[in-house]
Structure formats: structure tokens, C-alpha cells
Amino acid sequence: MRLSQCFISSTRCTSGEAEIHQELNLNADQAQRYIQRTADVMKELKYVAGNRLSAGDAVAQGQNGDMAVPNFEPLYPDSDCSAMSATWRNSLQSLAWFMRYWRDNFTAAYDLNRIFLIGSDNLCMANFGLRDVPIERDQALKVLHQRIEQYRNAPQNERGNNLFWISQGVRPGVGYFYALTPVYMANRLQAMLGVEQTIRMESFFTPGSLPMSVTIFDDNGQPLISLAGAEGKIQSEAKWMQERMWFGYSSGFRELVLKKSLSPSSLSIVYSVSVDSGAGADPYADHQCYRS
């Protein structure tokens, strides 16, 4: 019996649909914990960065020993970073001491690859590499440009929010997750603090008897990273992208879909299970069990 034949159309889920919803919802909770944990890390790093940057001279004088301090590198061709590297040296040294402590004690637990600091005025970046992970420099800088412009063009009341995005890696279902947060001192934006960590889509579901695919979308419904089954990647649909949580059938009655927003980011995760209903549309294609 095909999976689609086990379900009937109603305003409430059948027992079979409810079981699938429960399984997918538990998987989505894993993705939510990943995003929330990164947001918590960013909050801690933001607090430390603000303190270290504001008290850089005093802290740096009390620390002995050699410490590799990253130089500021230009994000834009016309950015002059030489003066910034000299002015911020003590602050960067103070921050570098903390980053080494973080690397030795927490990097493995949080799967962090690097932490970077971007000056607010001339858009120069200091990269605190925590792991020997190669970086696709041109692509990474291009995306950083886009995100910084997104921040600058955002309404004033939204500029305190963190930015989150994902870049697909070489291997399917493996990529890099980025978070960027503003650092203020005396109510003035001083820098943007960011982290990069590896994201593995296989961590967001437990393989079971039902074949499924998982995809993360941005707020425009564009797929960022996916681990798809034999049926291929699912395409976003307006009827469920507008909801914080949605569970029901895709158009054409081809997949049973769970979509959940991943707060506090603007990303969404979508799980899909093929119902193998064959070609053609089904009158129950818009059957929806859960929404919020």
C-alpha cells in the first residue's frame, strides 16, 4: 500500500500522519537547538568582545608572553586597514588572549572554525582562526559584503539583530553556518563580530524506515543547503513559507511536508517525505494538519 493511501482528507491529521509529524518534529527540534546554541554563543562572545575592546590597553598590559594578533584585512578594495591595525592593536591582543582560551576549551564543543571582527567604519576584517579549516576566501568575502549591506540597509530598529546565513560546502549536506552580531560601545557601533562553524544536515534527522529529505531555506524561500533523498530537493511553496510552523501535503500531493522557522534566525527547515502518489495533481493537495 502506498503511503498516500493510508491517509484521508480532513481538517485533522490521521494517526499515520500524526506519527510522521511527531517524528519530523523531533528532528526539527535538533536543528532548533543548533541555531539557539549558536545564538547563545554569540551573546557571550559579544559581551566579551565589548569588554575587551573597551578595556584593551589595560588588559593587554597585564598579559605576558607572545600572542599572535591578526591584522585587519580589507573587505573592499578601497579599504585602508593599516591605520586600523595600529589603533586597534592592544584591543586585538586582548581579544586574541580570550580567543586562545576559547579555542583550547570550547572550540570542539561548539564546532567553531573561526571568529572574525569587522570594523564598522572602513570594513576591515580581523580573522581569529580557531581551526585549520580552509576558507573559500573569494566566496566568503562576497557573501560578507552582501550581509553587511543587508545590515546597513535594514531599518534602524532592526540593526541590533543578529544575521545568520549558510554557505554550501563541497560535500552534499555539509556547509558553513555564519552568525554576525553588532558590537556597541557608548551607544556607538564599533564592530561586527562573526563566527563560522561547520553545519552537517545529517545531524538534523535520525535515519529511519521512512526516506526523507531535509532542506534549510532563507527568508526569501531560496534553498541554502540540503540533504536530499532519491526524490531530489523540495521547492518552497508560498502557502507554507509564510507560516512559522506548517505540516501538510505539497502541491501535487507528492510529499508530506513539515516546515518550521528556526528562531532567532530568519531561516526555516523543511522535512519532506515522498508519498509516492504518482504524476498529476490531487484534490487533497492543500490538506493541512498543523499551522501556527
Image (tube, helix red, strand yellow):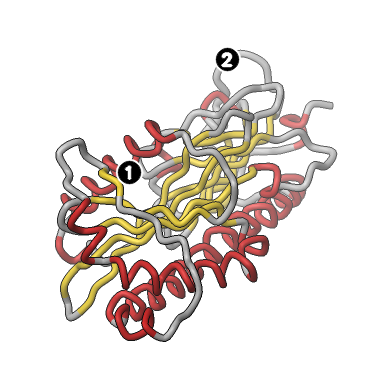
Regarding residue 92, the answer to whether it shows in the image is: yes
The residue indicated by pointer 2 is: 280
The residue indicated by pointer 1 is: 144
What's the amino acid at mark 2? Answer: Gly
Q: Is residue 81 left or right of residue 50?
A: left
Q: Secondary structure at mark 1?
A: helix
Q: Is residue 200 left or right of residue 90?
A: right
Q: Is residue 60 left or right of residue 156?
A: right
Q: Secondary structure at mark 2?
A: loop
Q: Quadrant of the N terminus?
A: top right
Q: Earlier in the sequence, mark 2 or mark 1?
A: 1
Query: Which is more foreground, mark 2 or mark 1?
Result: 1
Q: Which mark is residue 185?
A: none
Residue reaching furthest to the top = 279
> Looking at the picture, how far across and down is residue 272, in whole percent?
63, 36
Q: Quadrant of residue 8?
A: top right
Say few, some or many: other residues with alpha carbon within 10 Å of mark 2 (under 14 / 14 to 19 / 20 or more): few
Say few, some or many: other residues with alpha carbon within 10 Å of mark 1 (under 14 / 14 to 19 / 20 or more): some
> Looking at the picture, how far across and down is residue 190, in whole percent?
22, 67
Residue reaching furthest to the front = 65
> Looking at the picture, how far across and down is residue 89, in whole percent?
30, 66
Kindly identify the residue that appears in the image at 52 percent across and 34 percent down: 168
Kindly identify the residue that appears in the image at 71 percent across and 22 percent down: 230
Instruction: Using the image as rendered, state which of residue 278 and residue 66 is in the foreground.
Output: 66
Q: CA distance from mark 2 to mark 1?
A: 42 Å
Residue 207 higher or lower than 91, as above or below: above
What's the amino acid at mark 1? Answer: Leu
Kindly identify the residue that appears in the image at 65 percent across and 54 percent down: 25
Instruction: Using the image as rendered, state which of residue 139 and residue 124 is in the foreground.
Output: 124
